[in-house]
Structure formats: C-alpha cells, structure tokens
Image (cartoon, rainbow, N blue to C red):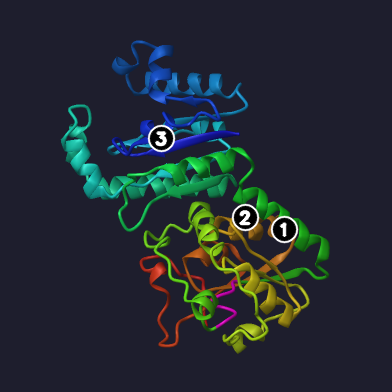
Amino acid sequence: MRIGLYGMPAAGKTYILDQINFIEAAAGSKLLREYDPDFDIQDKTGRERDRKAVAQLMKAKESFIMDGHYAFGNETVFTEYDGELYDAILYLYISPDILKERMAASDKNCGYLKYDIMEWQEREITGLRRYCQDNRKDFYVIDNPPDNRFEDVSNVIRFIRDIVNGYSCAAYARKCAEHIMNKSKSDTIVLLDGDKTLTIEDSSRTVFGYITHLYDGNYYTGYQAWKQNEEFDRYVLNDLTEIPVHFNEKVKAAITEDTYILTSGHEQIWRSLSKQLGLDFFCGAQMSAETKLFITKQLQDAGKRVIAYGDGMNDYFMLKQADEGYLIAQKDGSISRSLRGKDTEGLIIV
C-alpha cells in the first residue's frame, strides 16, 4: 500500500509522519534534496524532472506513506507521476485561519501569506479529488470539525493503520458492483440513497437521536464515513420491529427488479428497511461519495444503464455520473445545503 499525505505548508504532515511506526514513513522534500542537492535552484523543468525521478524510485517500493505538495501558491507541482505512485491519497485539512497563524509565525512559510489561503487549499482538495475519481483511487479528506485543527491525531493514525490493513472505498465499490452484476437481470440498474431519499426522514436521527458534526466541512469522503461508523457503534438497537420513518412514495415507485440501496445510514436500521422492500443494500464504514461514484462507473463499464436517486453531497458524484440522476428536494422545494454552489445541471429535481 502506497499512501500520499498531502496538505498545505504548516498543516502538520510531518507531525503525523513522525508518529507512524507500522509502515515506512518518508519525507518527500527530504528525498528530493537527497536526490538532487541543487533542487532549490533548479528551474521549473529541472524540479519536475527531479520529482519524476524520485517518484520512479519510490514506485519500486510496495508499501510506504510519503508527504507531498499539490501546489505552491498559484503553481501546481502535482504531476501524473505523483498520482500514479499512490494507491490512496490523504489530504490534511486545517482551518485557513489557523494556517495563517502558523505561517505568520514561521520564517520558512510566512511568504505564502500573499496568497488566498482558503482558495489555495480548496483548489488542492478539488484537484486531488478529481484526479483520484478519474483514476479510481481512494481519496480521503482528513478534517476535524468544528475545531479544524488536531490537538490529538490518534484518530488519524488509526485511520492510516486501517488503510494499511485494507480499508478502501474503491475496493468496497468493486465488491458491491460485482454483487450487483452477478444478481442483475436487466440492462438498467437503479441505485437509491437511503435517508432523506428513500425515506423522508433521517432514520438514524429519528430512531435514536443521532446528530453529528463529522460532515460540517462538507467533505463526504471515506474518512468521514469511517468516523461515522465508529459513532454508530455506540448505538446497539435491540428492537426494530417498528421504525418510525416513512418511505418517499415517488422514489419507492422507481423500484424495479434491479434496484439496490447504497446508504451511509445505520446498518441495523437499513437491514430492517431493506427487508421490508425486498431489496439488497450496501452500507458501512466504506460507503462514501466516492464509493457510490465508483459503483456507478463500474456498472456502466459493464454496459449497464444506471438510474440514481439521492438528496445530498454524499450522492452528488453518483448522480452526476449516472445516465439519469434524480435529486430529491426538501419539503419546501429547496435542495440540500450540502449542495450549495454545486453544478446541478443535468440532474432531475424531484
């Protein structure tokens, strides 16, 4: 497993690498300067040549985690050679205000304050996420709302350990798609999100009062799904004979013989609800926005036409990729706040 750890200057990547002892941890900048002591005085072409050479050297290794930079200010330094090197890319998100404080206190990094730090960080996240989606690699934004700093990185270290031990949204998506392909009987597959799509209510909140801040940053990646699954482990539901939620009849009417539920909701609740409908469902710690996207792509690669229903950011990429994407509006006709500013052109609002 080859893992890239990305983030802004002063984000704290080195601090995390220093605490990892279960996989080789490498400092990308140190390797570059060991390879070429004159790296800092090279022109853009020379630095790119050095980065390519170091990437090729590291590609010979089967397992490591290495930090890297996507951009320096307005100059993007991430290349295809970097992307090809990694099986998974993690991005350490830190509040722009905190980054500014750290940069201002650092002789090494204070020069970066001339840039729009918020825009720079979001550009990095968008670029890396798009690269990983296009190449079906795992991408995880590591954030910590509402503080957006890490006084304690134990969760991050445990997550990295789980990745080394096999946690992968991309691999889980392949498993789900293979199950669907083996069971499907038609050329059209219908994929349904669960809460607030197939059900009117958020089932976890309705059944046991679940409220979380994990998605406050609007990053619906596998890291947030992993943490949510840990929160769900606190709730053991003994009696689910009656679940006080209601199905969305418009979505329910779309169910065919080849319909499957992809949900980030609580497994016990959705096991019961899916049984009521006679549908297969997929959920758990690896059900993220990327998982749903990759399932859709793999089904399309196999020649299937995909119709998808969802309500928010966790469904967005699936809906945009699907042959028909149906966006479920709220009762007042508005769409989820998680999709504010997103391109919804081509989606059918229900």
Corner quadrant of residue 199: bottom right
Which residue, given by chain and number where applicable, does mark 2 sit on? Answer: 294
Mark 2 is surrounded, within 10 Å at the Cα level, by few (under 14), some (14 to 19) or many (20 or more) other residues, namely: many
| Residue beneath the point at 75% across and 60% down | 303
Secondary-structure class at tag 3? helix
Which residues are drawn in magenta?
Answer: 193-199
Task: Give the CA distance from mark 2 to mark 1.
Answer: 8 Å
> In the picture provided, is 221 more to the left or to the right than 37?
right
Task: Give the CA distance from mark 2 to mark 3.
Answer: 29 Å
Q: Main secondary structure of the magenta part?
A: loop
Task: Give the CA distance from mark 1 to mark 3.
Answer: 34 Å
Instruction: Say which mark, if any, is on residue 16.
Output: 3
| Disc nearer the start of the sequence (1/3) | 3
Q: Are marks 2 and 3 in contact (CB under 8 Å)?
A: no
Query: What amino acid is at disc 3?
Result: Ile
| Disc nearer the start of the sequence (2/1) | 1
Secondary-structure class at tag 2? helix
| Residue beneath the point at 80% across and 67% down | 184
Which residue, given by chain and number where applicable, does mark 1 sit on? Answer: 177
